[in-house]
Image (cartoon, grey):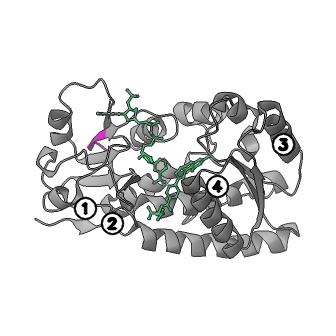
Amino acid sequence: MNAQIIDGKAFAQGLRERVAERTAQFSERAGRVPGLAVVLVGEDPASQVYVRSKHKATVAAGMASFEHRLPAETAQDELLALVASLNADDAVDGILVQLPLPAHIDENAVIAAISPDKDVDGFHPVNAGRLATGLDGFVPCTPLGCLMLLKDRLGNLSGLDAVVIGRSNIVGKPMAQLLIRESCTVTVAHSRTRDLPALVRRADIVVAAVGLPEMVKGDWLKPGAAVIDVGINRVEGKLVGDVDFASAAPVAGAITPVPGGVGPMTIAVLLRNTLVAAHRNAGIAFEAGTL
Ligand SMILES: NC(=O)C1=CN([C@@H]2O[C@H](COP(=O)(O)OP(=O)(O)OC[C@H]3O[C@@H](n4cnc5c(N)ncnc54)[C@H](OP(=O)(O)O)[C@@H]3O)[C@@H](O)[C@H]2O)C=CC1
Ligand SMILES: Nc1nc(=O)c2c([nH]1)NC[C@@H]1CN(c3ccc(C(=O)N[C@@H](CCC(=O)O)C(=O)O)cc3)C=[N+]21
């Protein structure tokens, strides 16, 4: 067997086009365009690249992009004041504060300060709680993008065995919640997990969100498994995932590459969430349809 490659870049491109069409309809009806504010604190080069591509994608979708770049020394209170002003700004539908933040700033305090109705990252505890309890809310972009790719490939996920490797609030935990919602049997692995290869071997779906280059090996996989590689690791100037693609591709049924897999989906879903936020904030019903 040789895995089908899941082309996240192409899927994301399609999603962005559909979002752009719906954005044009929204703007005509609401008399204004959806707005996304992105806040970057410090000069981390990788974060600067992400913020730049988010800005370009936002404008390309027909939305307004408000970029706020603050120096690394910015005090937490200044950042909280900026968030408060964005919460109050009617032109801003979505707010994203790029993570990680400098060590002197409490990330949880900043996330909690974002209005849950503008929290297009889905990181606010209210939105995490909504996801966990089955209420409507914003779902974190990366896991939602992973789920879209899985459903596109596999259709109904009901009853499948899924292993999520990683339990962070921004990827692993919400991914597990989404898979539970789809009626998968979900196992969440982390750094204390015993015998990870044995768990992975039982899984029909493997989502790797660890941050260790090429840690998941092909001989851990059940033949035919769907493998979603969330990892973004820079090794010797090259981008590699958390899955050893060379050994995994011959065993898996389908697999996302890095780059060109999950990463582009994250940005496309961010635009989708911003469009949803704009509808809610303008009091216009949103029909999810193909979004
Ligand atoms: N493509 C995209 O759009 C995005 C990609 N990423 C990438 O995804 C990866 C994960 O990100 P994130 O969730 O933020 O990372 P975190 O560092 O927050 O979480 C990593 C998780 O992996 C677990 N872990 C660490 N070592 C092992 C191990 N040896 N075996 C099993 N589990 C282990 C940790 O366990 P413990 O909890 O016990 O410490 C933790 O739960 C990174 O490579 C990141 O760059 C992230 C966001 C978006
Ligand atoms: N508040 C917040 N929200 C985030 O969503 C968020 C964040 N902080 N901090 C950092 C992580 C990481 N992240 C990525 C987005 C796009 C790609 C992406 O487009 N990757 C391309 C390659 C990009 C490249 O070449 O560097 C790909 O995988 O094909 C990757 C990673 C969003 N994150």
Amino acid, disc 3: Leu
Marks 4/1: CA–CA distance: 27 Å
Asked if residue 271 is positioned above or below residue 69 in the image, the reply reads below
Q: Which residues are magenta?
A: 158-163
**Of callouts 2 and 4, the N-terminal one:** 2
Q: Which residue is mark 2?
A: 6
Where residue 141 appears, as percent x and y from the top left, is: 55, 51
**N-term-proximal mark, 1 vs 2:** 2
For mark 4, what is the residue? Answer: 273
> Residue at 75% across / 46% down in the picture?
71
Q: Are marks 1 and 3 in contact (CB under 8 Å)?
A: no
Ranked by sequence position, the earlier of labels 3 and 2 is 2
Cβ–Cβ below 8 Å for labels 4 and 3?
Answer: no
Residue contact at pointers 1 and 2, CB within 8 angstroms = yes
Q: Residue 135, percent across and down?
A: 60, 37
Distance Cα–Cα, label 2 vs label 4: 22 Å
Quadrant occupied by the N terminus: bottom left
Q: Is residue 288 visible to us here?
A: no
Q: What amino acid is at disc 2?
A: Ile
Label placed on residue 254 = 1
Q: Which mark is residue 263?
A: none
